[in-house]
Image (tube, rainbow, N blue to C red):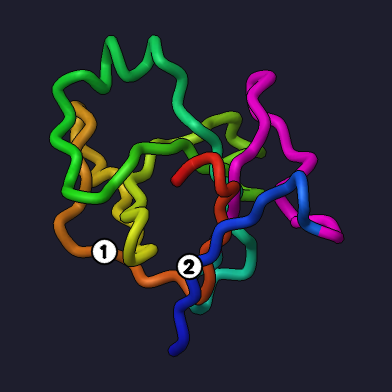
């Protein structure tokens, strides 16, 4: 299984990314990734500063990681966008472990690809 982590500069990129025109709660998407054996792409959105200052303030963030929200076709139907942790160097993703308080799994998922806006580096 090949995993690719890439960054796109939308100002110079000639073409369209699948995530480029996606919006969640008036916030523009900043990337996407796919997992093996999962039909839909995961669209990635930045978390807002008020989220980092409130319910995410006590979350332990792993080295080289950032917290984002993601949306899939399924979560869109349910109207929710869970948080996810992405390693900005390796491209590994860590899903919320499902506990009442936000905490991320210790075992990562390995996407087949991950592409983020270069401004997220």
Disc marking residue 5: 2
Q: Going 45% across and 27% down the picture, which residue do you hit?
A: 47
**Residue 88 % position (x, y):** 36, 54
**Residue 109 % position (x, y):** 33, 66
Rendered-image quadrant of the N terminus: bottom left
Residues shaded magenta: 14-33
Task: Pick the residue in front: 5 or 26.
Answer: 5
Q: Going 32% across and 46% down the picture, which residue do you hit?
A: 85
Is 83 on the left-hand or right-hand side of 16? left
- Measured in 3D between alpha carbons, the distance from the residue under mark 2 to the one under mark 1, in whole angstroms, is 15 Å
Is 4 on the left-hand or right-hand side of 29? left
Q: Going 19% across and 39% down the picture, which residue do you hit?
A: 61
Q: Is residue 35 above or below residue 96?
A: below
Lower sequence index among marks 2 and 1: 2
Task: Pick the residue in front: 66 or 105.
Answer: 66
Task: Pick the residue in front: 10 or 27.
Answer: 10
Q: Residue furthest front?
A: 12
Disc marking residue 108: 1
How crowded is the residue under tag 1: few (<14 C-alpha within 10 Å), some, or many (20+)? some
Q: Name the main secondary structure of what is drawn in magenta.
A: loop
Disc marking residue 71: none
SS at circle 2: strand
Is 51 on the left-hand or right-hand side of 34? left
**Residue 67 % position (x, y):** 35, 37
Q: Quadrant of residue 45?
A: top right
Indicate whether residue 17 is drawn in magenta: yes
Q: Going 54% across and 65% down the picture, which residue do you hit?
A: 6
**Residue 73 % position (x, y):** 66, 49
Q: Is residue 37 above or below residue 119?
A: below
How crowded is the residue under tag 2: few (<14 C-alpha within 10 Å), some, or many (20+)? some
């Amino acid at each position: 299984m090949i995993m690719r982590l890439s960054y796109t500069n939308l100002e110079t990129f000639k073409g369209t990314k699948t995530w480029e025109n996606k919006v969640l709660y008036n916030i523009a998407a900043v990337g996407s990734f796919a997992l093996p054996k999962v039909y839909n792409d995961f669209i990635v959105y930045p978390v807002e500063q008020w989220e980092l200052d409130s319910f995410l303030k006590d979350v332990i963030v792993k080295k080289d990681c950032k917290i984002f929200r993601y949306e899939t076709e399924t979560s869109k139907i349910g109207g929710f966008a869970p948080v996810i942790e992405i390693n900005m160097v390796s491209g590994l993703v860590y899903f919320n472990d499902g506990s009442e308080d936000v905490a991320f799994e210790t075992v990562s998922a390995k996407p087949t690809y991950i592409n983020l806006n270069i401004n997220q580096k």
